[in-house]
Image (cartoon, helix red, strand yellow):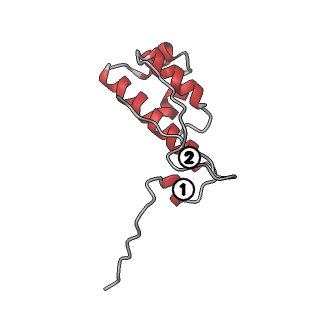
Amino acid sequence: MSTITLEQGSGNVYADLGMADAQEMLVKAKLASKIGDIIKRQNLTQQQAAELLAMPQPKVSMLLRGQFRGISEAKMLECLARLGRDIDIVVKPARRRAVAGVAGRVNVVFA
């Protein structure tokens, strides 16, 4: 019998895979997931969604399949607004005191 070893993830699969842009990719994944949920809930076809989002249908298809590298966070936020969502961006001090060279974090919260 072979032994299976489990390792605790960090909560960010992109970081666990060693990707340099892990934080950005996690934010985009959350935004893409929410866009997909709304499109599904509104029973939109990809073509209808493309027209509403002002994006070519193939790009909508890629977004819904998790291939969003060519789509900016700003465009994703615009998509959410076009889908009838209000967007609030809150900038606040980090929980821990900032240390030189240590960035704050970006978090996406859906109400």
Distance between the Cα atoms at labels 1 and 2? Answer: 7 Å
- The image quadrant that residue 34 belongs to is top left
Which of the pair 95/61 is nearer the observer? Answer: 95
Residue 55 vs residue 101: left or right? left
Category of crowding for the residue at label 2, using alpha-carbon neighbours closer than 10 angstroms: few (below 14), some (14–19), many (at least 20): some
Residue 100: tell me if it is visible: yes
Category of crowding for the residue at label 1, using alpha-carbon neighbours closer than 10 angstroms: few (below 14), some (14–19), many (at least 20): some
* Quarter the C terminus occupies: top left
The percent position of residue 42, horizontal first and vertical second, equals: 32, 19
- The image quadrant that residue 74 belongs to is top right
Residue 66: tell me if it is visible: no
The percent position of residue 40, horizontal first and vertical second, equals: 33, 26
- Farthest-out residue, front: 97
Q: Are marks 1 and 2 in contact (CB under 8 Å)?
A: yes
The amino acid marked with disc number 2 is Gln
Which of the pair 39/81 is nearer the observer? Answer: 81
Q: Secondary structure at mark 2?
A: helix
Residue 23 disc label: 2
Depicted 10 relative to depicted 45: above or below: below
- Farthest-out residue, bottom: 1
The percent position of residue 37, horizontal first and vertical second, equals: 35, 30
Which of the pair 51/76 is nearer the observer? Answer: 76
Depicted 50 relative to depicted 69: above or below: above
Residue 15 disc label: 1
Residue 62 disc label: none
* Quarter the N terminus occupies: bottom left
Residue drawn 54% across the image and 59% down it: 17
